[in-house]
Image (cartoon, rainbow, N blue to C red):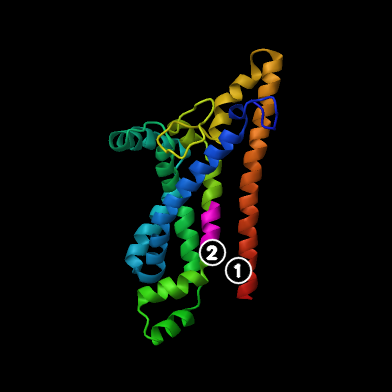
Amino acid sequence: MKFYYDPDMPSEYGMIPYIFSTLYVGVGATALALAIGLPTAIYLAEFSGQRIRNIIKPSMETLSGMPSVVMGVIAFFYIVPIVFAFFGGLLCPLTAWVILAVMSLPFVVSISEDALKAVPNSYREASQGLGATKWQTSLHVVIPEAKSGILAAILLSLASVLGETMAVWMIIGTVNTPPITLNPLVPSNVISSMIATYIYGSEGGPASYAAQLQQSLYGAGLILLAIIGTLNIAVAMLARNRSTRGA
């Protein structure tokens, strides 16, 4: 397995399938987390009372502290059978979407709520003074003003999902070459779980095989680090733009 381009090597044996699968799983899980987390953040910031907030916020903090392996066990014994019963898929990206979305919810909810609360109350008062309802104010005034913070939450969630290893490794499947397909029910593999799967083989077998495998694992790690680093830089730039606008 080589992470660089080799014209004599078939494309299915390179890193492109792993990169595609990693991004496919990451984007799908983040989209699902956004579909659940953003309405939750809007409700907490704009509509809920203190009693509800005191229940949901500690729940998010507890969820963020759950070990990855525990979440993987829960997904393996509960989510995987449900996905198999309804969709026919077993270890596949769809199961990874569900558990990774749950694991990244604290990022989406907490950061999005903070961004929504940072919008000055004068904006809300002006909108409602012109006759807008609270929902209209939230949708057309508050959310557009908090869009950079919400985008930062999305990018941080995506970065955390892309770097997740144990839970994904337990429930997505570990095929040698993940197929380049948009079907979420086909067993796949991602860069992080591929590294976890092959790391022990890099110390055994013929010296030439071990050297090539080590090279591939280093390359895969660098690719994953570059993707996550790019996302973190984008978040830092968004945070800087927010602080500049606030000043």
What residue lies at 53% left-to-right and 32% top-to-bottom? 193
Query: Can you give x and y, in whole percent of width and height, for residue 68 in the image?
Result: 47, 39
| Image quarter of the C terminus | bottom right
Q: Which mark is residue 242?
A: 1
Q: Amino acid at mark 2?
A: Gly
61 lies above or below 243? above
In the image, residue 79 sits, relative to residue 11, either above or below, namely below
Q: Residue at x 46, y 36 (%)?
A: 167
Mark 2 secondary-structure assignment? helix
Q: Is residue 215 visible?
A: yes
Instruction: Point out which mark residue 78 bears.
Output: none
Q: Does the CB distance between marks 1 and 2 fall below 8 Å? A: yes
**In terms of secondary structure, where does tag 1 sit?**
helix
User: Residue type at mark 1?
Assistant: Arg
Pinpoint residue 241: horizontal percent, then vertical percent.
64, 67
Q: Horizontal placement of 186 versus 199: left or right?
A: left
Q: Earlier in the sequence, mark 1 or mark 2?
A: 2
Q: Which residues are magenta?
A: 150-156
**How far is mark 1 from mark 2, CA to CA?**
8 Å
Question: Pointer 2: what residue?
Answer: 149
